Image: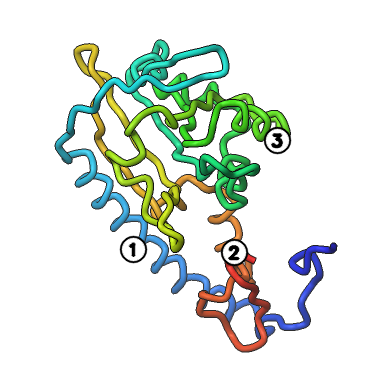
Amino acid sequence: MSNPKTQQPEAAPQVVDRAAFDAALEEQVARDKEVTRLGDQVSAARRRLPMVEVDNYTFEGPDGPVTLVELFGDHYLLLVQNVMHGVDWDEGCPSCTWAVDNLPANMERMGEEGIAFAMISQAPIDKLEAWRAQHGWPHTWVSSGGTSYHDDWGWTVEGEDGSPFPLPGYSYYLLHDGRPYLTYMTGARGTEAILPVAHIMDRTVYGRQQDWEDSPEGWPQYPTYG
C-alpha cells in the first residue's frame, strides 16, 4: 500500500517576487525567535525543578534482572523512553516505534554528555526482544512487568475494557549519592521535543499533514494515528 504523503499535492503557496518573499520570511523568523526565547525561559524553569527519589526497581532484561541504577551504566544522567507495549500485545505501539526510530543514529553522542538511555515497557522481555530485533534497535530495553513502576508513576491508565493501558513518554533521572531521582517527565505532545523528524516536517510547506493542524484550504491532511 503506497504512502499518500509521498505523492506531491496539487495545492501550493502563492508565488510572489523575491522582495515580498523576503519580507514575509523576516516576519516569520521574528516569530520563530520569540518561540526560541520563550523556550529558553521554560528550560531555565525546568532546570530549577526539585527532584524526587525513586525506588531502585528491578526490571527484567534479556540477560536477567536489571535495576534502575544499573541502567545508568557509567553515567549520572538517564533518559528513559516509556514505550507502549502492553503485557498481552504481540507488537509495540506504532507511534512509539516511530519515536524510537527518531533517536540519534549515533547514541554515543548522548553518552559523551553523561546521558544513558534505556526503554521500559510492561510486556514480557521475550516480546520486547522480538520487537527490538525486528526493528534492528541496539538500545537497552527492559520489562517492568514484575514491578509496580508503571502504576507508581502514571505510565498506565485504565483502558475502555477496564484493563491497564500503557502511556508513552519520557522520564529523566539523576543518579545522586548512588540513588536514582526523577527530575522531569513528560508525555503526550511533550515528547515531540526530541523527535527531529516531526520538527523537520513542521518546517516544510505542508507541515505534518495531520488533521489537527491549522493549514490553508487544500493542504493535504490525514488522520494523526491513521
Q: Which residue is drawn at 48% across and 36% down?
A: 121
Question: In this orientation, which residue lies closer to the viewer: 98 or 23?
Answer: 98
- The residue indicated by pointer 3 is 135
Q: What residue type is labelled 1?
A: Glu
Q: Do the residues labelled 2 and 1 touch (CB within 8 Å)?
A: no
- The residue indicated by pointer 2 is 225
Q: Which amino acid does label 3 sit on?
A: His
Q: Where is residue 48 in the image (x, y as percent from the top left)?
A: 16, 39
In space, the residues marked 3 and 2 are separated at their CA atoms by 20 Å
Q: Which mark is residue 34?
A: 1
- How many marks on residues? 3
Apparent side of residue 1 relative to residue 86 in the rendered image (left or right): right
Apparent side of residue 160 relative to residue 11 in the rendered image (left or right): left
Q: Helix or strand or loop: what does disc 2 sit on? A: loop
For residue 189, above or below residue 103: below
Question: Marks 2 and 1: which is nearer the front?
Answer: 2
Q: In which quarter of the image is residue 44?
A: top left
Apparent side of residue 96 relative to residue 11 in the rendered image (left or right): left
Q: Are marks 3 and 2 in contact (CB under 8 Å)?
A: no
Q: Where is residue 1 in the image (x, y as percent from the top left)?
A: 85, 62
Question: Marks 1 and 3: which is nearer the front?
Answer: 3
Q: Which residue is drawn at 45% across and 37% down?
A: 81
Apparent side of residue 214 relative to residue 40 in the rendered image (left or right): right
For residue 25, above or below residue 141: below
Q: Residue at x 79, y 72 (%)?
A: 8
In space, the residues marked 1 and 3 are separated at their CA atoms by 38 Å
> Mark 3: few, some, or many residues within 10 Å (few <14, many ≥20)?
few
Mark with earlier residue (3, 2): 3
